[in-house]
Image (tube, helix red, strand yellow):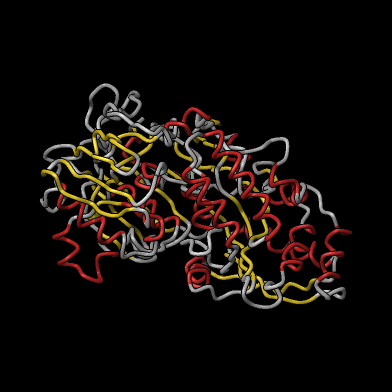
Amino acid sequence: MFELDRRLFLKGAGAAAVTPIIGSLATLHHPAHAATQGGSIVIGVPESFGSLDPFRRIGRLDYNAVINILDTLVTYGADSIPAPGLAESWERSDDLTWRFQLRPDVVSTDGTPMDAEAVKFSFDKIREGNFASQFARIESVDVISPTEFEIKTTESFPTLLVELAQQYASMISPAAFEAAGDGFGRMPIGSGPFKIDSLEPNSELVMSRNENWWGRDADGNALPYLDSVTWRVLPDNETAALALQTGEIDFLYSLPTALAPSMMGNSDITVSSAPTYGWQYMFFHCEQPPFDNVHVRRAVQLAIDRQAIADAVSFGTAIPCLGPITPSSWAYDADNPGGGFVGSAPDLDAARAELAEAGMEDGFAFTMIHPTFPELSAMAQALQAQLAEIGIEVTLEGKEIGAVLDNLFASDFTGLLIDWSGRIDEALVFGSFFRSDGGNNFGKFADPALDEVIDKAATAPTIEERAALYQEAEAMVMQGSPLAWVLVPSEIKAMSSNVTGFVNQGDLRLRAWTITRSES
């Protein structure tokens, strides 16, 4: 069985994030379906969990755990529009002042009240973490009452709601954090839909239902439906696929594209696919040779045959990525994606001209680090062969994803191939990856003129102005080429046919609280 989910995030949704005055919003109701209360599922995942500290740089699988155990003030519905989370309503009284009303009587799973004091404590930790720059415009967080607090900003911050929905803006139990100290990232505690029962590295993570969670479906039924969720580490793709087919597991977090056709033909399995906001791409270290030379970076960009890689590696499930703004975004310019710098096919003459401009007509050599996941390994090999056509010799260094992330977070690489899940608002993309002080700017790219355009785009009053400014910023990014974009992947997951309720929003997040499993 095959399901194709497409996001409903249109221009109107983007506008909702930047409207100058935002009134109270109704309680978020998750779509109801023929749900079975209780039961459990086992989810197969390709790697072990690392740190679950939401305020640090963590891996994609780690933040999938985080969103199931910690709440954020704002969340998203299936339409990707900001919606109430812990904050049941808010208003923007002027350009610099936001007031939030919390849900009453919410407690963390350790019994600590999730009140305005806990929110203020969480903000203190957020601003000590790796993503503090995302909230640099916040001047103060002031407690008004146990259920009310106010955020004051130094300048207009129209994308605040979008930032507050990210995992690095999670709300935590102050008591648990103080008690755990440096160990908080192993067993974080908050007020989310689940709580951690156990975490065994390289084996499994077990969560159980938070009986007191505030979430409800559209019919008023308490969420989550499931009593427990086990995330089991199955690094071998064939083994994981067989485990799903035999019923050892109920859900496959990431279905390799090569296995998708066979799974789609199995009536006992549902395959869910959705286009993502993200990329498969290569980081350049822009402060180290040879990629400290912009012409070298451009040469690599221009030499990539993206369509050939899409055909050979993704089996038709991905499309060429021509720049940081993907077709799913409200800021995408279909007539001139990426400012027209690259296309689906390579331009080898232009690539060689860039090498000549850099004084490297005969090419050069570098090492590309990449995860050992089959698709990214195959992509690395394809890039190696394609770059050889213009005299660039690539040595491939495959590593487990944890080791790759260690290199990435330490900016310890020359070239590094990886993928990213993307974000629904371009402020989170450009501010994080391409601003000089961005939290994901691991290649140390810096362009003060680009910083100015990014800042203007984040604070522009209308969605049309923001889109135009982000397209201008995208063209500047492509000229600077801090990354080499390859493909826009699809999010493909597989599950037993008796598992229902999963909503594929294309953001690589598995929200287990809407899932149910029948015994039949």
Q: Is residue 412 left or right of residue 68?
A: right
- 77 lies left or right of 6: left
List the single residue furthest toward the right.
349
Rendering quarter of residue 162: top left
* Quadrant (top left/top right/bottom left/bottom right) for the C terminus: top left
User: 385 or 337: nearer the eye?
Assistant: 337
- Residue plotted at (17% across, 58% down): 174
Is 160 in front, or is 310? 160
> How many marks do you count on the picture?
0
Q: In the picture, residue 197 is in which quadrant? A: bottom left
Q: Position of residue 458 (x, y in %)?
A: 48, 46
The answer to whether residue 294 is left or right of residue 465 is right
Where does residue 25 sit, x and y in percent of width and height? Answer: 29, 28
Quarter occupied by residue 296: bottom right
Could one spot residue 480 in this view of the protein? yes
Q: Residue at x 40, y 60 (%)?
A: 133
Residue 169, above or below 292: above
Q: Residue furthest top?
A: 219
Q: Which residue is painted at 89% across and 59% down in the image?
A: 349
Residue 42, image x, y percentages: 36, 47
Residue at image position (26%, 47%) is: 151
How far from the left and from the top, in percent, is residue 439?
A: 46, 62
Q: Quadrant of the N terminus?
A: top right
Q: Which of the two residues, 228 or 82, is positioned nearer the viewer here?
A: 82
Q: Is residue 390 above or below residue 70?
A: below
Left or right for 145, reference 27: left
Residue 499 visible, this angle: no
